Image (tube, rainbow, N blue to C red):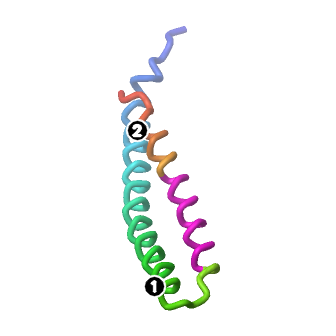
Amino acid sequence: MDQVDLASWSAPVDRTSIYDELSRVEREVVAAERQLAEQERLVLDLKRKGQQFTGAEKELERLRECQRQRDQDRQRLLSLPQP
């Protein structure tokens, strides 16, 4: 029975999937950076005005954690072997 070279057969599909996923993650990272900057400005503004900011600060930490996850996803995708 002949063996099929699955690596060469599936490489274009895998490469496309990887690039598509990386592109999606990159878009999310950029959008989240904007959201983080807005939330940081909000926290600073609330602090400066002497208003309650703990809720905004908690949201900022949540956003930062989500961004760390996106960064890890991006690094994972970038570290995959390139066909």
Q: Which mark is residue 81?
A: none
- How crowded pointer 1 is (Cα within 10 Å; few <14, some 14-19, many 20+) is rated as few
| Of the pair 53 and 9, the residue shown nearer to us | 53
Q: Quadrant of residue 31?
A: bottom left
Q: In the figure, 73 relative to 30: above or below? A: above
Identify the secondary structure beneath mark 1: helix
- The kind of residue on which mark 1 rests is Asp
Identify the secondary structure beneath mark 2: helix
Q: In the figure, 12 relative to 49: above or below? A: above
- Label count reads 2
**Percent from the top left, x then y, of residue 14?**
43, 37
Residue at 44% in and 23% down:
7
Q: In the figure, 70 relative to 6: above or below? A: below
Looking at the image, the residue that sits furthest to the top is 1
Most frequent secondary structure within the magenta stretch: helix
| Image quarter of the C terminus | top left
Residue at 58% in and 59% down:
65
Residue at 59% in and 82% down:
53
Alpha carbons under labels 2 and 1: distance apart:
37 Å
**Percent from the top left, x then y, of residue 19?**
37, 45
Q: Quadrant of residue 16?
A: top left
Image position of 78 (left or right of 52):
left
Q: Which residue is mark 2?
A: 78
Magenta stretch encompasses residue 67: yes
- The kind of residue on which mark 2 rests is Leu
Q: Which mark is residue 45?
A: 1
Magenta stretch encompasses residue 4: no
| Residue stretch rendered in magenta on the structure | 56-70
| Of the pair 12 and 3, the residue shown nearer to us | 12
